[in-house]
Image (spheres, helix red, strand yellow):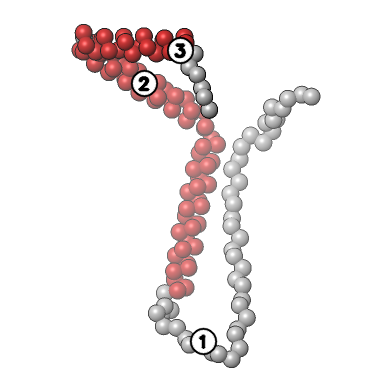
Amino acid sequence: MNHRVQPIIAVLIALGAFGFLYVLVTNPGEMAKMAVTVIVAGIIIYFIVKYVMNRNAGSEGAAFKKAAKQSRRRMKEQKAKHRAGHKGRVSHLRSVPSASKPKPMILKKKSQTQLTVIEGKKNKKKNRALF
């Protein structure tokens, strides 16, 4: 696509670049000071936003962490049980298949995954446009 930059925006970018180069050439110490100030302000804003977002998550975030922890623990237990069942077997020895009748394949049922319900705002109405 052919996007054209509006002339006002192009002039503002050019003036900004010119000002940046001018300050860099005439007073590099001030430029470094401004850069440090901008970086520190950005870090402060980042932590403020992160704090506010975590505070808003509140109990829902805690419920999610609890459910994730339970799920990890359950998966570890299942893996340990699975490994214990295969411990006595020798994997490198195989029986020679018979040429007469092929055995019908038995399909194993997969264990049903256990889902944890996280309590949340269930009475919250959806914001829909009225027609």
Q: Position of residue 4 (x, y in %)?
A: 50, 19
Asked if the residue under mark 1 is in contact with the one under mark 3, i.e. CB atoms within 8 Å, the reply is: no
Q: Amino acid at mark 2?
A: Gly
The mark found on residue 42 in the picture is: 2
- Is residue 107 placed above or below 27 in the rendered structure? below
Residue mark closest to the camera, 3 vs 1: 3
Q: Residue at the location (58% across, 49% down)? A: 116
Left or right of residue 24, residue 7 in this image: right
- Is residue 35 placed above or below 63 in the rendered structure? above
Q: For the C terminus, which image quadrant?
A: top right
Q: Secondary structure at mark 3?
A: helix
Q: Quadrant of residue 106?
A: bottom right
The Cα atoms of the two marked residues, 3 and 1, are separated by 76 Å
The Cα atoms of the two marked residues, 3 and 2, are separated by 24 Å
Q: Quadrant of residue 108?
A: bottom right
Left or right of residue 74, residue 117 in this image: right
In the picture of the structure, the residue carrying the numbered disc 1 is 97
The Cα atoms of the two marked residues, 1 and 2, are separated by 68 Å
Asked if the residue under mark 2 is in contact with the one under mark 3, i.e. CB atoms within 8 Å, the reply is: no
